[in-house]
Image: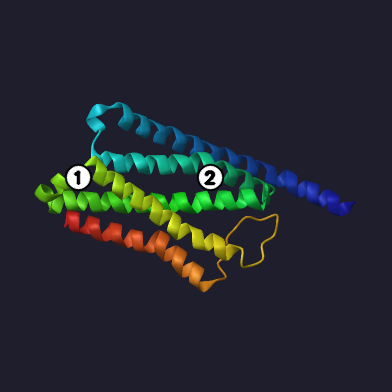
């Protein structure tokens, strides 16, 4: 009985912080959804913005919109409840969308940096190649690469033991850690930094 009272008291003490966290994250999700919706709508509706470079920005906005709508709500519930209660199938779907979209977001930033670099350093030649079809090919490559990078960590997740009340990828596997961190973060970030350094130097 004393243990139950203690547990109830702990839950009551932690309630204000949980409410604050859930409100903050919900506000962030709503803001992300709204901003990216406006960006997508502006590029689609405004004829002057129908430019290959803006198609990349629109695709990036779609990626961030998907994170806000399909990833963040589940994250909020998981963080506040401190346990996963939606089953392992939903967990796999959620993790795959999360990793794919987050990887896709940084790869889009790399593609945008590459597009700007070529537009500045090889303006005449690249202006001929900078067509909607070219932008579409770049966007397709970015999405395919994102899926290719995000799938192996999910496969490695099932090689280890996972509890029903958690939905995480444990990085016990050294190959998984190197593959996911370098493919989804370090290599794209390095490329972005190098390209913008060359643009502004």
Q: Which residue is disc 1 drawn over?
A: 130
Sequence-wise, the earlier of marks 1 and 2 is 2
The image shows residue 152 at horizontal and vertical percentages of 50, 63
Residue under the image location 61 percent in, 51 percent down: 91
Look at the numbered disc 1 and give the secondary structure of its residue: loop
Residue under the image location 63 percent in, 40 percent down: 19
Look at the numbered disc 2 and give the secondary structure of its residue: helix
Q: Nearer the viewer, mark 1 or mark 2?
A: 1
Please say whether residue 170 is visible from this viewpoint: no
Residue found at the far left of this picture: 124
Q: Taking 115 as reference, is 45 left or right?
A: right
The image shows residue 18 at horizontal and vertical percentages of 64, 44
Among the 4 quarters of the image, the one containing residue 183: bottom left
Q: Is residue 33 above or below residue 75?
A: above
Residue 71 is tagged as: 2
Cα distance between the residues tagged 1 and 2: 33 Å
Please say whether residue 147 is visible from this viewpoint: yes
The image shows residue 136 at horizontal and vertical percentages of 30, 44
- State if disc 2 and disc 1 touch (CB < 8 Å): no
Q: Taking 110 as reference, is 171 left or right?
A: right
């Amino acid at each position: 009985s004393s243990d139950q009272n203690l547990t109830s008291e702990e839950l009551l003490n932690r309630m204000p912080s949980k409410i604050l966290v859930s409100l903050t994250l919900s506000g962030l999700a709503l803001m992300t959804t709204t901003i990216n919706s406006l960006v997508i709508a502006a590029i689609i509706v405004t004829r002057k913005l129908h430019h290959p470079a803006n198609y990349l920005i629109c695709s990036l906005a779609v990626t961030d919109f998907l994170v806000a709508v399909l990833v963040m709500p589940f994250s909020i519930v998981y963080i506040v409840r401190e346990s996963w209660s939606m089953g392992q199938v939903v967990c796999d779907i959620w993790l795959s969308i999360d990793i794919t979209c987050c990887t896709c977001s940084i790869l889009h930033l790399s593609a945008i940096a590459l597009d700007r670099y070529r537009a500045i350093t090889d303006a005449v030649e690249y202006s001929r190649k900078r067509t909607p079809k070219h932008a579409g090919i770049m966007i397709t490559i970015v999405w395919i690469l994102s899926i290719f990078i995000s799938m192996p960590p999910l496969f490695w997740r099932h090689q280890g033991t996972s509890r029903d009340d958690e939905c995480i990828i444990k990085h016990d596997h050294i190959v998984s850690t190197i593959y996911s961190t370098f493919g989804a973060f370090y290599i794209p970030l390095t490329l972005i930094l190098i390209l913008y350094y060359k643009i502004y130097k």
